[in-house]
Amino acid sequence: MFAERCLPGGVPAPLVFGRGATDEAPLLRCLETVLADRFGRSGTGDAAAERTVLELLRSLAVLRGDGGRGGGEPGTRLLLAKEHIDRHLADPRLGPEHVAHALGISTRRLSRDFRRAGPSPSRYILERRLERARQDLADPASARLTVADIAHRWGFAGQPHFTRVFRDRFGRTPGEVRPAVMGPGRADSAVVRQSSRDTL
């Protein structure tokens, strides 16, 4: 399958990849993320994950085989861009220019790669930040953090902007997503009131 889909003719000897090689590290991190996600879920067939793994392996083999630059295919560049974004979401400076520079491509090429798959790079960054913030807001373990703390944690410049884009995206304010905190005796009194109505 590798020879057929990735590198016609195969490779003359086993290839061992490691994070020590600067050019290989982003591809390997991305491959590790895809495999961890794939094997962390139940179910068997996942054609998208299979294609992604083969594309990453192809990029690694080409990089090692002929000394070319890895991640040259649009699909691979997109995977690497998304992996870079996920690792730098907390950096308020993260933007298309930052991502393009990290990948060694122009912002125009980055935009074209994203356009093939859906949202623009800026929109993708915003969506990922909002999703991570929503997860934190809904997590009882983050109850001690203020909304402003969580907004800052995920790279938002200020709480008003965060609240506005959060409401636009999810239809609720950040405060409405937080789990209800029951004070001492509040849960019991709610049950008593309900029981009283039931008996009347």
Image: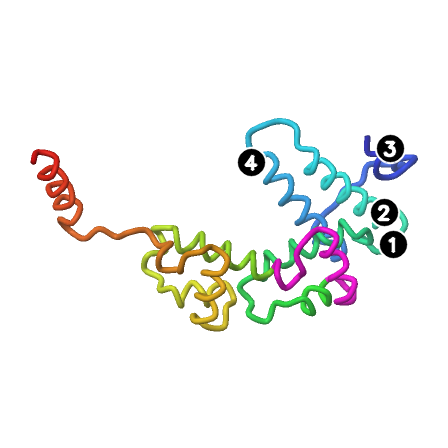
Q: Residues within 10 Å of mark 1 (few under 14, many from 20)?
A: few
Evaluate if marks 2 and 1 touch, with contact meaning CB atoms under 8 Å apart. Answer: yes
Q: In 3D space, how far apart are the residues under numbered discs 3 and 1 (Cα atoms)?
A: 20 Å
Mark sitting earlier along the chain (4/3): 3
Where is residue 93, by image quadrant?
Answer: bottom right
Crowd tier of the residue under label 4, counting other residues whose Cα lies within 10 Å: few below 14, some 14–19, many 20 or above: few
The amino acid marked with disc number 3 is Glu
The region drawn magenta spans: 103-124
Q: Position of residue 34 (x, y in %)?
A: 64, 42
Residue 4 tag number: 3
Left of 74 or right of it: where is 194? left
Q: Name the residue rendered at 71%, 51% in the picture.
A: 117
Outermost residue, front direction?
Answer: 200
Q: Which mark's residue is nearer the viewer, 2 or 4?
A: 4
- Spatial CA distance of label 1 from label 4 is 33 Å
Q: Which residue is mark 1?
A: 68
Between the residue at mark 2 and the residue at mark 4, the CA separation in whole angstroms equals 28 Å
Q: Which mark is residue 40?
A: 4
Q: Amino acid at mark 1?
A: Gly
Comparing labels 3 and 1, the label whose residue is closer to the camera? 3
Dot 3 or dot 1: first in sequence order is 3
State whether the magenta stretch is mostly helix, strand or loop. helix
Camera-nearest label, 2 or 3:
3
Residue at x 26%, y 52% (from the top left corner):
181
Asked whether the residues under the numbered discs 2 and 4 touch, taking CB atoms below 8 Å apart as contact, a structural biologist would say no
